[in-house]
Image (cartoon, grey):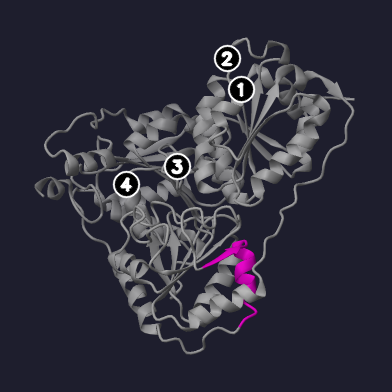
Amino acid sequence: MRHGGQILIDQLRAQQCDTIFCVPGESFLAALDGLHDANDITTVVCRQEGGAAIMAEADGKLTGRPGVVFVTRGPGATNASIGVHIARQDSTPLVMFVGLPARDMEQREAFQEFDLEAVFGGLAKSVEVIRQTARIPEVVSRAFHAAVNGRPGPVVVGLPEDMLSGAADCDDVPEAVIAETCAPPQTIDRIIDGLSQAKRPLVIVGGPGWCEQTRAAAEAFAAQSDLPIAASFRCQDYIDNAHPNYVGHVGIGVEAALGDAVRNADYLIVVGARLGEMTTGGYKLVRPPLATQQLVHVYPDVGEIGRVYRPAIGVAASSRAFFSALATRQLPASPGWGGHRAALREAYEAFRAPVATPGAIRLEDIVLTLDDLFDPGAIVANGAGNYTAWVHRYRGYRQYRTQLAPTAGAMGYGVPAAIAAALRYDGRQVVAFAGDGCFLMNGQELATAAQYGVRLLTIVVNNGMYGTIRMHQARQYPGRVHGTSLSNPDFVGLARAYGGEGEHLSDPLEIRAALKRGLSSSVPYLIEVPQSPDAITPATTLEAIEAV
């Protein structure tokens, strides 16, 4: 006989879980007791449930296995909902356990009681409450299977307090099995036949189920027929950016030639990406439901194919299986689009050439200097805001999963995601970028970083406003600034209060030395970078927008 908390932790161990993130709650004390002697599972205690859920989501991105987070009922679970939403839109495997009131208190609106299934039913792939202690292994196994199969995503599991403290005699269930999807040979033949007739083909990659081996296979496929290959929104690390067939990032502020290439492609092969709003430029580069391009859509979940776009060819297959199948086929040996690929690559390289922006400290200099100081495996995390445009434009990614950036566009993501990365890969360079508004949403997790001896560098870009909203305000309601200005604290002082170190960067000649100090620091290090409010994007100024 084991109590439910011990059964639960033993079942997590069977699922190869080695790290959990949490903010403790009285409703899952039995699970904390089960973790007491679990020396093979690291418990990371966070400062707010949103930060904990983001760390778990980032850990799921990094490993391909479900990230695991524990939160308590009511306030804890609703705080953590941001991590569930990110995992949903980013197709990240995540399992969130929520402590609930005892079963004999249900439906009385007991202390912090809420309707778990109603709150998370529209966000999670699956929501379930375990009401029998003996069924913990069964439900946990089902949760992990749901999180990793088809389109990966978040699963929420409720844990009534008395169920968890109860005892049962039951067997553990082995690790969840990923059901492999495949690309039928006849479908691969059709794709190659269509490709052989194309004049302006383009490949876009992204989405779930990627790995270093898939990256290598995708690059080999592109190189064999000299195909241009691009990354979907915030999937820039899926292809080595130095590869001659890589032609850029189809995201916010897409480079003009690449945007035209998507719009005018006669054969568009999309592997793993959903073709969401950001990748399609508000559904204008690829128009639903019937795209003007001949669209080949490869996705691991058959339910996604045809949901927004009616493809010419739909393939329910993982990216790995698709590129493995292509590797066995003979592709066009003398393609007629070599000049097309070369022109797009040239445009991408020109796009990465620095463009001077206003202010004494220029964000392009920060990103390009870091790029020069980085090892190939350095990990960069960021949240949301116009500051990210500099990171996306000037950072060159060389390996898979060196970019942690939410396609859900969530502010406050960078710091907790970077902490998860530094915990997972001790010794690797890890940098979090955050705007001044973005940082204060989860900056308190620097206390978590200090508590666990995490080494990471945080760059806080301070322009005294919510820059993205200020930009839209200037475009739509010029001269009527309201609700977008910020009065900020001393960010370096905050970092020191949390147990880290840092500095204010004011001299452009000190950029390289400051970044080297931050990267070599043995404690969390924060550099506050002042940015001119006029430097609203890498391509234009706020003054120019207001003048239009």
Classed neighbour count for the residue bearing mark 2: other residues with Cα under 10 Å, few (<14), some (14–19), many (≥20)? few
Q: Which amino acid does label 1 sit on?
A: Thr
Label 3 to label 1: alpha-carbon separation? 24 Å
Would you identify the image quadrant in which residue 110 lies?
Answer: top right
Callout 2 touching callout 3 (CB < 8 Å): no
Q: Position of residue 16 (x, y in %)?
A: 74, 45
Mark toward the start of the polypeptide (2 vs 3): 2
Q: Does the magenta stretch include residue 529?
A: no
What residue is pinned by disc 3? 414
Check if mark 1's residue and mark 2's residue have beta carbons within 8 Å: yes
Q: Where is residue 182 in the image (x, y as percent from the top left)?
A: 67, 65
In the rendered image, which residue does mark 2 sit on? Answer: 112
The residue where tag 4 is placed is 387
Read off the magenta span.
Answer: 313-329
> In this view of the protein, which residue sits in the foreground, 396 or 170?
170
The local secondary structure at tag 3 comes to: helix
Q: Name the residue under label 1.
A: 72
Q: How crowded is mark 3: few (under 14 residues within 10 Å), some or many (20 or more)?
A: many
Which of the image's four quarters has the N terminus? top right
Callout 4, which amino acid? Answer: Tyr
Closer mark to the observer between disc 3 and disc 1: 1
Query: Disc 3 or 1, which lies upstream in sequence?
Result: 1
